[in-house]
Image (cartoon, grey):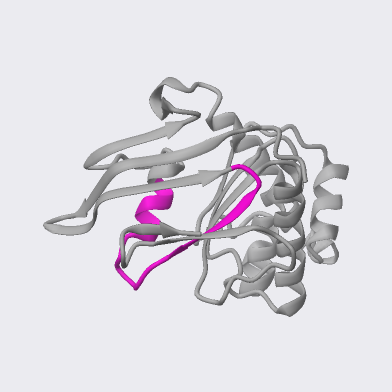
Amino acid sequence: MNTGLGTALKGRGLTARRGNQRLFHSLDFEIPAGRVTWLRGQNGSGKTTLLRIIAGLAQPDGGTLLWNDRPLAQCSDYCQKLVYVGHNSGLKDDLTALESLLFLARLHGQPCTQAQAESALKRMGVNHRRNLLVRHLSQGQRRRVALARLVLQTQAPVWVLDEPFDALDDGGIVTVKSLMHECVEQGGMVLLTSHIPVAFDKLPTLEISLDQGVGTP
């Protein structure tokens, strides 16, 4: 395993609220390179909020995020290393599957040719649906199209994934786990939420529990 990146994402004293409700308070954690980290917690505990904070889409109400021991706000290269796939696949109903993937790649600054997009859709098992409008795809097929971004993001070692296995069948889950394995083997890090148990053969995993507010190896 190549863990030569030596990178780590750390949270120090993170606090977040939703209205008058406190989701989590004074949360400390560390996500090292070369690991899959499973973010766990009951419904409403703030899992999606924390992922959005880590992805730079929301701000905490307190505390600091560090990338290689530097405040995230001072790390201009962090966004270039990040892939965020939210629980909502973010696809446009009036685009085809192929057009949607190309659009997502451009939106996130990822160079992508049609051939590369088709190859990514093939890896995800939906290239045969590439010319169908998104509105005609099943939920599982939509999820596969959104997750095809992971195939394209070979140079992005930080993956933040909100329920990536949602709506996938067994074959889709195997494919996504394989992609995560490849990312980690190259020294990347994967942070995910999942309602199904997260288990990887011979792959180091960590857990962060928002119910307890601490990380466990």
The furthest residue to the left: 20
Question: Quick check: 137 above or below 53?
Answer: below
Q: Going by the image, does 106 lie left or right of 178? A: left
- Image coordinates of residue 49 in percent, x first then y, are 35, 53
Q: Which of 94 and 9 lies nearest the eye of the viewer?
A: 9
Q: How many numbered marks, from 0 up? A: 0
Question: Quick check: 36 above or below 194?
Answer: above
Task: Please identify the quarter of the rendering in which residue 91 is found.
Answer: bottom right
Q: Which of 200 and 89 lies nearest the eye of the viewer?
A: 200
Judge whether residue 209 is colored magenta. no
Q: Which of 172 and 141 lies nearest the eye of the viewer?
A: 172
The furthest residue to the front: 217
The range drawn in magenta is: 33-52
Residue visible at 61% across and 69% down in the picture? 165
Q: Going by the image, does 11 lie left or right of 195? A: left
Residue visible at 64% across and 56% down in the picture? 146
Q: Going by the image, does 82 lie left or right of 113? A: left
Task: Please identify the quarter of the rendering in which residue 179 is found.
Answer: bottom right
- Image coordinates of residue 52 in percent, x first then y, are 41, 48
- Image coordinates of residue 213 in percent, x first then y, are 31, 59
Judge whether residue 39 is colored magenta. yes
Residue visible at 50% across and 75% down in the picture? 195
Residue visible at 86% across and 51% down in the picture? 119
- Image coordinates of residue 201 in percent, x first then y, are 74, 68
Question: Quick check: 203 above or below 26?
Answer: below
